[in-house]
Image: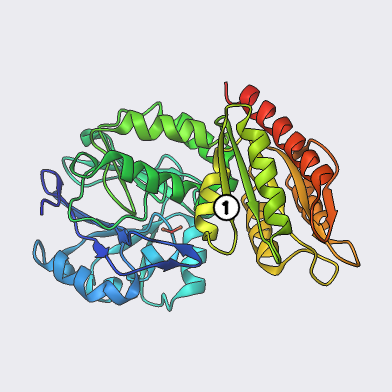
Amino acid sequence: MSSLLRDNINWVGHIDWDVRDFHGYRTERGSTYNAYLIRDSKTALIDTVKSPFSAKLLADISAFIDPGKVDYVVCNHAEPDHSGGLPAVMAACVSAELVCDAKCRDALSAHYDTAGWKWRIVADGDNISLGRRTMVFIETPMVHWPESMFTYIPEEKLLFSMDAFGQHYASAHRFDDEEPLDVVMGEAKTYYANIVMLYGSQIAKVLDRASNLAIEMIAPSHGVIWRKNIPVILGAYRDWVVCKPKPKVLVIYDTMWKSTEMMAGAIAEGAMEKGVDVKVLNVRSTHITTLATELLDCAALAVGSPTLNTTLMPQMAAVLTYFKGLRPAGKAGVAFGSYGWAKGGPGAVAEYLKAMKVDMVRDPIECRFVPGAAVLGECRNAGGALGAKALTAGR
Ligand code: FEO
């Protein structure tokens, strides 16, 4: 396995083949925690790994250099999947300065016992010479936390991009051209949708800054390193930061006795008649991670829940709470569902959608117990309206 990015710049991270849950995100293909070692007149470690893998990280560093001789440990992002190894690393790298911005020092100090750490606080645009190469620091707030930053090596046209452009994707190879591009891009999309969709405007600024840099390689903190398909991932991010819609209608629902499921089917039929792509997903058989990924680029969504105890079903409440936090932009939508002796489910769904600033094409479609021809006709019409919106938006 080649871990060499450039002369004397090596990947020293960890491949986590086994992880399947990343604070609720379903990581079907595992992940990697990427750390990088730059050996020059000075030596720098860029980021660490999750804490259980600290010993392996130190062993990998030791294959190249005595950890006691590392000069700088750069922390681009304080989240524990990248900073968890810092206590062990800082204990072993006795000469090293911990390089980060002021917000990162604050965050790290709230996570770890940092007594004895030597800090080197940097700000946007600062740089540190390693000899032949220079580390330039670019603050990227909210990509993914407030303290996040990129480290750029201009002499190598190499950008260490932390979470940005990453994927939860464990693989034997380290580079994008060594793995199937469709799979990697699918995981990059899932990552974007579930981790940073709500920070689209901040990421757009980062993309603008990145466009002014000469870049031949992007080394994120998760997944493969981009060296061949950089325009592909940057182009995809340009679309994702604005939730650019495809001509696609997403129908998601929960159901108790199949009434809401029948309504979902009729909405899907109406949308399909417009010739758009339609996805119909039951929230109890589709993971929330997949639902968020489908949400990112749909033009319209129909969300259905039966009424349980005068409100929506609990699993749908969880999905909509997640969606609301991700702040998808520019979607059309409709709420639907059944009730028995008391209303509440579809109305509660509609409130969530309105809070997400969804452009509602009509009032909630409600049916008492089992939908008859009239209600199913309403559903088909609503599906048609969403399909028409998706056709226009997806052009
Ligand atoms: Fe991969 Fe925001 O940590």
Task: Inspect this view and state whether residue 329 appears.
Answer: no
Q: Is residue 346 above or below residue 67?
A: above
Q: Which scheme is used to colour this image of the protein?
A: rainbow
The residue sitting at 80% across, 44% down in the picture is: 373
User: In x, y percent, where is residue 100?
Assistant: 41, 56
- Which of 267 and 133 lies nearest the eye of the viewer? 267
Q: Quadrant of residue 313?
A: bottom right
Question: Which part of the image, by quadrant, shows the N terminus?
Answer: bottom left
Label 1, on which residue?
Answer: 281
Residue 129 appears left or right of 367: left
Q: Residues within 10 Å of mark 1 (few under 14, many from 20)?
A: many
Residue 67 place in picture, x, y as percent: 17, 68
Q: Which residue is drawn at 54% across and 36% down?
A: 241
Q: Does the residue labelled 1 lie within 8 Å of ligand 1?
A: no
Tag count: 1
In the picture provided, is 130 more to the left or to the right than 97?
Answer: left
Residue at coordinates 27% horizontally, 65% vertically from top-left? 17
Q: Quadrant of the C terminus?
A: top right
Query: Looking at the picture, does residue 198 appear above or below residue 208?
Result: below
User: Residue 243 placed where, x, y %?
Assistant: 57, 36
Closest to the observer: 311 or 73? 311
Q: Where is residue 245 in the image (x, y as percent from the top left)?
A: 57, 32
Task: Kindly state the secondary structure of the residue where label 1 is placed.
Answer: strand
Answer whether residue 103 is visible to the viewer in this image.
yes
Ligand 1, by image quadrant, is bottom left
**Which sits in the foreground, 43 or 5?**
5
Looking at the picture, which amino acid does disc 1 mark? Leu
Q: Write the residue at 27% across / 76% down.
A: 91
Instruction: Give the quarter of the image for residue 321.
Output: bottom right
**Camera-side residue: 267 or 13?**
267
Q: Which residue lies furthest to the front in this view?
A: 373
